[in-house]
Image: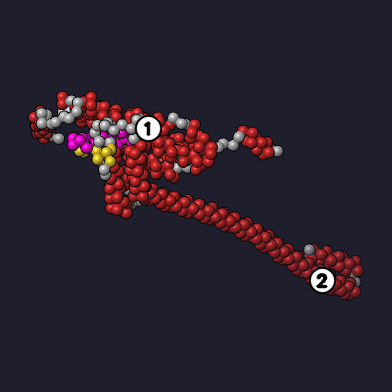
Amino acid sequence: MVLTGLPLNIDFQQILLHLANFAILFFGLYILLYKPVKDFMDKRTAHYKNMDDEANEKLASAKKKEEEYQNKLKEVDDEIAGKKKEASAELDNMRVEKEKEAKEKADKIVDDARKEAESVRANIINSASKDITDMVSKAAEKIFMSDDIEKAYDVFLEDAERSVKDGE
Amino acid sequence: MSKKKRTTAIILLIIIEIVLAAGIAFTNGAVEKHETIKEMMRDAVLHEENKINLFGIAVNPSLVAGYVVTAVILLFALIVRIFVIPKFKNVPGKFQMILETWVGFFDNLAKTNSPHSNGFLGAYIFATGTYVFTGTLFELFGIQAITTEGHSISLPAPLADINGAIMMGCLSYLVIMSGGIMNNKLRGVGLTLKEFSLPLSMSFRLFGALLSGMLVTELIYFTLGLSILLPVVVGVLFTLLHALIQAYVLTLLTSIFYGEVSEPPKPKEKKQKKEQNEVLI
């Protein structure tokens, strides 16, 4: 029986032997099991975190591109709307000009027609004056050649009235 | 299972039980008991009688059990390191999952309870938890050793020895103190010394829990009438349960106290108020 004097037979030598045993176990387990398994788990976590980060980056990039695409689409739509507006305005201008041209042409035609009509009238009046002159000269001839002045005068008036009626 | 198979299984079980009972009854007289239950229990607590020769030193059986447990764990770790870890995959198989859960449990325990400093703590509580759990389960195997007096003795749990428990309790306390010194210098030492009863409570909690488990189990084994079916429940389930509980309790306490003493000091209220005023200004 070995008694050390301490209660429950506490033995410092055996405590140290237990400590040595545990120290061996601690370092052995740390090197052989804990560290390699933990390293592997950490690496895997980092790997999946990287994948997650990359996926998030790609998602963000895709969202950005989508946004840019939407903006471009909007710009194109705006441009198309602008072009349409411009074309419409141009068309309106062209229509107005054409209408103006047509009106001018119509006015010219009407003017020409009027001028022609006036010219024809003038010609007619000239022609009628000539006829009157002829009639007057004929009537004068007849008067001179006729005895009866009064009769000649009546003939003259009748001819004049008739010529006016014809001229109208 | 069909009715025929079930009947066959029941008959087979009854035959095995009869054979075992007969074996126990016939060999009972052949077993030489060199000590009474009283002597055995007294020796389990005081370790006065049964010593084992270890490299020329007469030591308690628990110390030898400790070395055997360490050798078994390290051999297992070596095999795993050489044959299993290099084949680890990102999507783990069953065995890899067990290893990762085992390591991850203690790593997370350290990170949760000591968020400021947990690198060394994780490795320490991993080794401690493994040692306590495996060491407690070790008594189930009943590996025999020869005492210095020439008797055969079943090796107990390594920490059922007061020396082993004191080593574990005091070492845990020193680890806690080292965390305090590393992170808070002298303040850490003060914080650790404040819990001066910790090494004592940790040591004797472990010793008491494991010893009581062993004593109850031994008591049941010692009585022939109880040794047919009851050890299946008492020996396996109780041992498994208190192995888990003790490993968890010790590692949890260590990590909680480590986290407490390694926590950086909070800034004083006056300073905080001054900073708030400066921000407001």
**What is the quadrant of residue B123 in the picture?**
top left
Tell me which amino acid carries mark 2: Asn
Q: Residue shown at 82%/71% (left/top)?
A: A126
Q: Is residue B157 magenta?
A: yes
Instruction: Report how many numbered discs are placed on residues in the image.
Output: 2
Q: Is residue B240 left or right of residue B175?
A: left
**Pointer 2: what residue?**
A126
Per the image, label 2 sits on a secondary structure element best described as: helix
Q: Nearer the viewer, residue B107 or A56?
A: B107
Q: Nearer the viewer, residue B102 or B161?
A: B161
Q: Nearer the viewer, residue A6 or A87?
A: A6
Tell me which amino acid carries mark 1: Ser
Regarding residue B230, the answer to whether it shows in the image is: no
Query: Is the C-beta separation of discs 2 and 1 under 8 Å?
Result: no
Image coordinates for residue B124, horizontal then vertical, percent: 39, 42
Residue B101 vertical position relative to residue B246 in the rendered view, above or below: below
Regarding residue B121, the answer to whether it shows in the image is: yes
Per the image, label 1 sits on a secondary structure element best described as: helix
Image coordinates for residue B106, horizontal then vertical, percent: 38, 40
Task: Please give the range of residues in magenta.
Answer: B147-166
Residue A127 vertical position relative to residue A107 in the rendered view, above or below: below
Q: Is residue A132 left or right of residue B99?
A: right
Q: Chain of mark 1?
A: B
Q: Is residue A136 magenta?
A: no
Q: Residues within 10 Å of mark 1 (few under 14, many from 20)?
A: many
**Pointer 1: what residue?**
B203
**What is the quadrant of residue B108 in the picture?**
top left
Image coordinates for residue B119, horizontal then vertical, percent: 44, 45
